[in-house]
Image: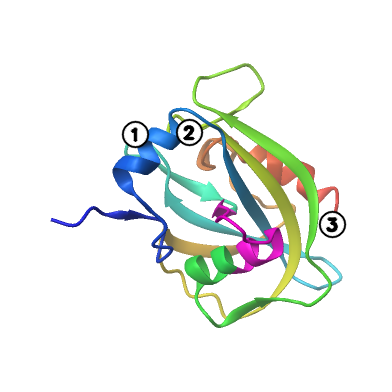
């Protein structure tokens, strides 16, 4: 029986090998806060499974592949999560902050019991029609003044989203 492959269509590391790697080293990731190009921009979040049978609103993102540029990784995750009908407007993608997720709960830190991750977090203007696929069970554009409650986010990302909004 062939091992399942980690990553939505990435076909990069068999599950067992990936579990071993993430138990030993931090994983480099990219995250994206999709925004609209309007006078009052809205932000796009996916709804997905997180951990322990939970779900929450999250940024778009995931691991960077070997020899993959960060811009390419962001675009790949956008397509893998929201389909081929949504795009980042050329020249709008920019890295805003580095977020670190720990496997153990720490005061004022982001939490992901699955792995220690270092996420290079981006903002980019997106256009087109999002179609949730892969890990995304839903996608919504939110007014900056009407974000989900902190408890409705996954991985504590409400804190990251609020910091990213200041950079829009």
Q: Farthest residue in the top direction?
A: 107
* Position of 151 relative to 109 (above/below): below
> Crowdedness of circle 2 by 10 Å Cα count: few (<14), some, many (20+)?
some
Disc number placed over residue 168 in the picture, else none: 3
Q: Is residue 17 left or right of residue 100?
A: left
Residue 59 location (% of width, % of height):
60, 52
Among the two numbered marks 2 and 1 on one chain, the one whose residue lies closer to the N terminus: 1
State the residue position of label 2: 115
Q: Nearer the viewer, mark 2 or mark 1?
A: 2
Q: Secondary structure beneath disc 2?
A: loop
Disc number placed over residue 52 in the picture, else none: 1
Determine the residue positioned at 73% across, 55% down.
122
Residue 86 location (% of width, % of height):
60, 78
Determine the residue positioned at 44% across, 60% down.
136
Q: Quadrant of residue 77?
A: bottom right
Marks 2 and 1, Cα distance to the nearest angstrom? 14 Å
User: Start and end of the magenta stretch?
Assistant: 60-75
């Amino acid at each position: 029986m062939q091992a399942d492959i980690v990553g939505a269509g990435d076909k990069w590391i068999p599950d067992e090998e990936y579990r071993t790697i993430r138990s030993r080293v931090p994983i480099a990731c990219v995250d994206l806060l999709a925004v609209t190009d309007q006078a009052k921009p809205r932000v796009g979040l996916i709804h997905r499974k997180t951990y322990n049978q939970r779900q929450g609103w999250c940024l778009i993102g995931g691991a960077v592949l070997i020899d993959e540029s960060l811009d390419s990784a962001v675009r790949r995750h956008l397509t893998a999560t929201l389909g081929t009908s949504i795009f980042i407007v050329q020249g709008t993608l920019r890295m805003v902050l580095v977020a670190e997720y720990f496997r153990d709960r720490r005061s004022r830190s982001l939490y992901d019991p699955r792995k220690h991750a270092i996420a290079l977090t981006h903002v980019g203007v997106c256009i087109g029609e999002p179609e949730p696929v892969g890990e995304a069970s839903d996608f919504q554009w939110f007014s900056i003044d009407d974000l989900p409650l902190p408890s409705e986010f996954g991985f504590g990302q409400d804190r990251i989203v609020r910091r990213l909004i200041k950079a829009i």
